[in-house]
Amino acid sequence: MKHNIDVLIDAKAVQAKVKEMAEAIRSDFGNEPLLLVAVLKGSYMFVSDLCRHLGSNVEVDFVQVRSYNGGTVSSGNIQIRKDLDINIEGINVVIVEDIIDSGATLDHLLAMLKTREPKALKVATLLSKPDARRVNVPVDYVGFEIPNEFVVGYGLDLAEKYRNLTYIGVLRQD
Ligand code: IMP
Ligand code: MG
């Protein structure tokens, strides 16, 4: 199947927003140490740009989760495939997500990380699809609210393709 991709958010707008989000995070935490917890794989590009704007006193760690489903519809059953390396007790943590869709992944992750008693636990997502939300999750920093359509680029994939695009695009199937 051939895909056409329409630009939804161009590269310049993405970069400007990432910088703005970093400034908002810094203004909340001052120069306190921060741990960015990036959710693989989709947020790898976002976290790499975000951390460059946060100056010193930033560490990055990764989790990978899998939404377990037999078919095409997410069951909301989330599994941890890769846990953090860093002990987050007493630490300022910002979860970094590419996109919040149903909210199920984030809901699970928040519940899990809360039990480890971080000093602060906040959430930054580049994209949010409010119309797709099934679980109400608190989000502190949102880049763009987008319509309930499948998007790719800047880390987001369709079957592992298109992650390397510098912009966010909407797939049109011909
Ligand atoms: P959730 O439904 O909020 O749990 O989102 C789970 C994951 O689905 C996200 O972190 C993304 O990796 C993926 N996802 C959701 N919507 C899209 C999309 O439009 N394009 C690519 N991946 C998506
Ligand atoms: Mg993701």
Image (cartoon, rainbow, N blue to C red):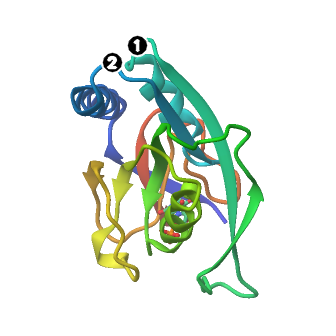
Kindly indicate the quadrant of the structure image that contains residue 120. top left
| Contact (Cβ within 8 Å) of mark 1 with mark 2 | yes
> Around disc 2, counting alpha carbons within 10 Å, would you say few (fewer than 14), some (14 to 19), or many (20 or more)?
few
The picture places residue 93, in percent across and down from the top left corner, at: 47, 41
Label 1 or label 2, whichever lies nearer to me, is 2
> Around disc 1, counting alpha carbons within 10 Å, would you say few (fewer than 14), some (14 to 19), or many (20 or more)?
few
Q: Residue at x 29, y 70 (%)?
A: 130
Q: Secondary structure at mark 2?
A: loop
The picture places residue 24, in percent across and down from the top left corner, at: 23, 32
Q: Quadrant of the N terminus?
A: bottom right
User: Quarter of the picture for ligand 2?
Assistant: bottom right
Residue that carries the numbered disc 2 in the rendered image: 31
User: Hey, what amino acid is under mark 2?
Assistant: Asn
User: Can residue 159 be seen from the camera position used here?
Assistant: yes
Q: Residue at x 71, y 87 (%)?
A: 71
Residue that carries the numbered disc 1 in the rendered image: 55
The picture places residue 80, in percent across and down from the top left corner, at: 73, 63
